[in-house]
Each structure stands twice: as structure tokens, then as C-alpha cells.
Image (cartoon, rainbow, N blue to C red):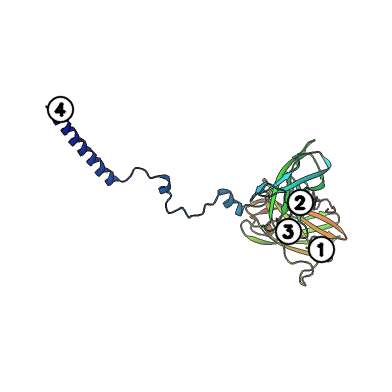
């Protein structure tokens, strides 16, 4: 066969193969699309990060940084005894935050609590001109959780936390048993109501002294009492709001102080009530279990003072 004839047959065969390939390709569609086409139609859908989504429902105190704001202790290793604790709040741009909106008569509320929940301090540090906060804290050996509750100007309130470590002979304490009443000095505080997971419930604490109702509680930070709840295990911080306020014409100065709280989960929680009487702020501590059927499930009142509820003046 002549060379020209062979070449013509080859070209014809190649044309048939290409035609068949084109037909098959149209029948089954493209094997892959370019990346930009694969997301067509979703280009205008807003993206939400997992951190933002979870953070919306996350209890306070679990994060050292949120929404770009960071709680930065000057050091995480501290000496036992009366020790100065210093820290800063950093803004999203990395600069030190100095503009705060006061909440409950303070620019920032500071809490120091041992990881075993046996010791607790609610304090109010002072800030210098450079945005450094400082406060003296009585520290015992072990791991402490430091919590800063504050509201940056123009931003929602938040609570950030960080662990610090105190060297020494550490003897962890078991969680105090659940009780419906506790004592501090010659005061007895009785808890009414149950903490419920996933729903708001009313908690009323009644203050008595030597068996007599206390009806002349003094305002402290804009309220007759402040209640903090911490979940055992991770020390999740619950914002608990008092019912009414001094001078509103309806809220009595004792013996009852009412709050509304929502537990994020079932389990054990530690409650700390600050109340002021005769010029002294005292702290009453309770262990409660969220998820109990009703308040009647609570055990008998405690008859001894619980560790970590010593009376003290709040700075």
C-alpha cells in the first residue's frame, strides 16, 4: 500500500476515535469541575467558624481568649501566702485594654478559686494607667483558677479564665457534700429552690443570725447579695442575676435574696453567696446538684462552717 494511502486511513481512524470520545464525554458529563465552580451558589453564604458557634452557648470562664480579647496573667507561677497577682486584658489588636463599662459598680470583677473548689475569693483589683491590674490574694499550694468578669466599652460582657500554680505541700480536698444550709460566723444561710439544667430557675437564699431573720442587709456592689456558681470539673462560670435591687421600692433588705440561674448541664455545682451585714462582707458556700427532681431532694442542712467561706472584706 502506498504511503499516502496508509496516512489517509490513519487520519480517518483517528477522527472516528475522537468523535466517539466526544460523544461519550457529553453523555456522562465532566469528570471534575474547577474549584470555583464547585462552590457556585454558595459564594454569598456567610461562613461561621466552629469557635464562634460554640462560643455563643459556652459558659464563661472556660477560655483564656474570646472574641479577640485575652486574659493575660503576668506570671502563672506564684508564691504561697499573701501574694500580689497582676494581669492585663488584651484587645483584639494586641494592645492593652483600658476602657471598661462598669457592671455592678465595678470595672472588673476578679475571682480566685482552687481547682478543688475548697477556697474562693471575690476581689476587686485596681488598674494602673498602663492597664495592669493588681490585687493581693491569700494563696495556698495547688492549682488556682483566676477569673476576670468584665465588659469592654462597646462590647458584651465576658468572663475569661486562666490557671496559675502555687508550689508547696498540696492536700486536695473532697467536694463538700450537698446541703440546703450552711453557716458562716453566727449566720445561717438556707437555700430554697433547685438548680436545673437547660432552664432558668429561681434560687432564694435566706439569711438568719442566731436563729433570727436578718432584715437589714446592706447593699454591696448594687445588690443585697451576689451569687456565683461554678461547675465542678471544669469550673464553668455561670452568670447569676439577682431579682430586684436596693431602693427599687419592692426589694426588701433580707432575709430573702432571690436569683435566677440556668445550669448548662446536669451535675454538681458550687455556689458562693456574698452578702454584707454590719459593714462586713461574708461568703456562704453550698454544693448543689443540678437535675434533682425538686428542692425537697436536698439533704439535711449543714451544721458546720464549710472551708473557703471565711468572712472577709472584699477589696
Dot in front, 1 or 3: 3
Q: Looking at the image, tell me whether mark 3 or mark 2 is earlier in sequence order.
A: 3
Pick whichever, 181 or 12, lies toward us: 12
Which residue matches tag 1?
Answer: 219
Q: Position of residue 119 (x, y in %)?
A: 78, 46
Q: Position of residue 145 (x, y in %)?
A: 73, 45
The quarter holding residue 272 reads bottom right
Dot in front, 2 or 4: 4
Q: Looking at the image, tell me whether mark 1 or mark 3 is earlier in sequence order.
A: 3
Mark 2 near mark 1, Cβ–Cβ under 8 Å?
A: no
**Disc ID at residue 101:** 3
CA distance for labels 3 and 2: 15 Å
Which residue matches tag 4?
Answer: 3
Residue at 60% over, 54% down? 56
Residue at 69% over, 52% down? 159
Q: Looking at the image, tell me whether mark 4 or mark 1 is earlier in sequence order.
A: 4
The quarter holding residue 278 reads bottom right
Dot in front, 4 or 3: 4
Which class describes the residues within 10 Å of circle 3: few (<14), some (14-19), or many (20+)?
Answer: some
Instruction: Report whether 303 appears left or right of 289.
Output: right
Q: Looking at the image, tell me whether mark 2 or mark 4 is earlier in sequence order.
A: 4
Circle 2 sits in a helix, a strand or a loop, which is it? strand
Which residue matches tag 2?
Answer: 110
Pick whichever, 83 or 133, lies toward us: 133
Circle 1 sits in a helix, a strand or a loop, which is it? loop
Dot in front, 3 or 2: 3
Q: Where is residue 6 in the image (x, y as percent from the top left)?
A: 15, 30
Mark 4 near mark 1, Cβ–Cβ under 8 Å?
A: no
Amino acid at each position: 500500500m502506498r504511503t499516502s494511502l496508509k496516512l489517509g486511513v490513519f487520519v480517518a481512524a483517528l477522527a472516528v476515535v475522537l468523535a466517539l470520545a466526544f460523544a461519550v464525554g457529553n453523555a456522562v458529563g465532566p469528570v471534575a469541575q474547577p474549584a470555583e465552580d464547585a462552590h457556585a451558589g454558595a459564594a454569598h453564604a456567610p461562613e461561621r467558624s466552629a469557635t464562634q458557634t460554640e462560643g455563643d452557648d459556652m459558659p464563661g470562664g472556660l477560655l483564656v481568649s474570646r472574641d479577640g480579647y485575652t486574659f493575660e496573667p503576668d506570671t502563672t507561677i506564684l508564691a504561697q501566702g499573701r501574694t500580689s497577682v497582676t494581669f492585663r486584658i488584651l484587645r483584639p489588636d494586641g494592645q492593652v485594654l483600658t476602657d471598661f463599662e462598669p457592671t455592678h459598680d465595678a470595672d472588673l470583677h476578679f475571682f480566685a478559686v482552687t481547682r478543688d473548689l475548697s477556697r474562693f475569693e471575690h476581689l476587686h483589683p485596681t488598674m494602673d494607667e498602663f492597664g495592669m491590674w493588681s490585687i493581693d490574694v491569700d494563696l495556698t499550694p495547688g492549682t488556682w483558677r483566676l477569673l476576670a468578669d468584665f465588659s469592654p466599652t462597646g462590647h458584651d460582657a465576658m468572663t475569661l479564665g486562666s490557671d496559675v500554680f502555687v508550689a508547696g505541700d498540696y492536700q486536695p480536698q473532697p467536694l463538700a457534700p450537698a446541703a440546703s444550709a450552711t453557716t458562716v460566723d453566727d449566720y445561717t444561710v438556707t437555700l430554697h429552690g433547685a438548680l436545673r439544667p437547660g432552664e432558668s430557675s429561681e434560687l432564694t437564699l435566706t439569711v438568719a443570725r442566731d436563729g433570727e431573720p436578718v432584715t437589714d442587709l446592706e447593699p454591696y456592689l448594687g445588690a443585697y447579695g451576689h451569687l456565683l456558681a461554678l461547675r465542678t470539673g471544669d469550673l464553668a462560670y455561670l452568670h447569676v442575676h439577682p431579682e430586684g435591687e436596693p431602693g427599687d421600692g419592692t426589694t426588701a433588705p433580707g432575709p430573702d435574696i432571690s436569683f435566677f440561674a440556668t445550669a448548662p448541664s446536669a451535675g454538681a455545682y458550687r455556689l458562693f453567696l456574698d452578702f454584707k451585714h454590719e459593714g462586713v462582707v461574708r461568703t456562704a458556700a453550698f454544693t448543689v446538684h443540678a437535675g434533682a427532681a425538686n428542692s425537697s431532694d436536698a439533704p439535711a442542712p449543714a451544721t458546720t462552717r464549710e472551708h473557703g467561706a471565711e468572712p472577709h472584706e472584699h477589696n
